[in-house]
Image (cartoon, grey):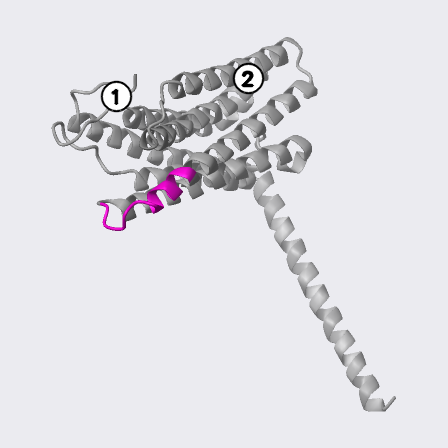
Amino acid sequence: MRPSSVGDMTSSSSSSSSVAVVVAYQLTEASNWWNDVNESPLWQDRIFHLLTALYAAVATIALIQLVRIQLRVPEYGWTTQKVFHFLNFVVNGVRAFVFGFRRDVQKLQPEIAQHILLDMPSLVFFTTYALLVLFWAEIYYQARAVSTDGLRPSFLSINAVIYVIQVALWLVSWWKPIRLVVILSKIFFAGVSLFAALGFLLYGGRLFLMLQRFPVESKGRRKKLQEVGYVTTICFSCFLIRSIMVCFNVFDKAADLDVLDHPILNLIYYVLVEILPSSLVLFILRKLPPKRGITQYHPIR
């Protein structure tokens, strides 16, 4: 081998080693930054206060929209649209309260009280967005001249079963606080989130395909296609991410969301699975219902 070739190889090897050292150093620095923020009470409070502000903003938007809908159609009772915005206000309002007093929540005894305050809003979030699946299912089956009489009882029954199981797990955990019960509770909620994701994929996908078959000149076809497509994608993604993250939360202590020293993970998780999806869906569904006499508007029965 020529001396120049040996020199080139040596230089290349040295350059690769230098790059590897730099990359390793940068990764170490990033890891140190992550740990420094997580372990800093000041940064913990800042991030929890940021989450409080974000949740309060979403709750305010939902409440304003609820008031606008009520002023638009005051003669109707609790329509699907009104219930959806009210539940959004409740979920985000409770989250804002919990993160505003996050340190106090962490001190609550018995420990099951902490789990209830942190997990109950997630259940209500599921019910809130399951309303959209119910609404789309009704539209889909009505368009196909199929009876929808059993949809609402099924919706209520499914929610009742989920709440009863979750409350039973909480009671067992309170009676005998062992790690296994907490794990079962988390796995159960991961399954509920996956069930919601599949519901959006099934009925959102069906409604989207049905709308695509409508005549091109149909009034509002393009806008409804976009609305259903965007909401389906957003809600399917957020519930799928939630299901995956909750599973990691169960089996990996580094992914635990119910502790004070993982504020960055809390910020990423709650922004991705609740704050951002809620904000986008409220924006997409911001259109007010038509005034009375323009078209028929059905309240929840």
Residue at left offset 20%, top offset 20% = 76
Between circles 2 and 1, the one closer to the viewer is 1
SS of the residue under disc 1: loop
Q: Amino acid at mark 2?
A: Gln
Q: Earlier in the sequence, mark 2 or mark 1?
A: 2
Q: Which residues are magenta?
A: 206-218
Q: Residue at image x 60%, y 49%?
A: 33
Give the quarter of the image for residue 152.
top left
User: Which residue matches tag 1?
Assistant: 299
Q: Is residue 245 positioned above or below 75 on the image? A: below
Measure how far apart labels 2 and 1 are at the Cα level. 29 Å
Of the 4 image quadrants, the one containing the N terminus is bottom right
Label 1 Cα crowd, 10 Å radius (few <14 / some 14-19 / many 20+): few
Q: Along the horizontal axis of the image, is 251 left or right of 1?
A: left
Position in image of residue 44 (x %, y %)? 52, 37
- Kindly give the residue lying farthest to the right in the view shown: 1
Decide if residue 227 is on the left or right side of residue 38.
Answer: left
Specify whether residue 292 is painted magenta: no
Q: Against 245, is 178 above or below?
A: above
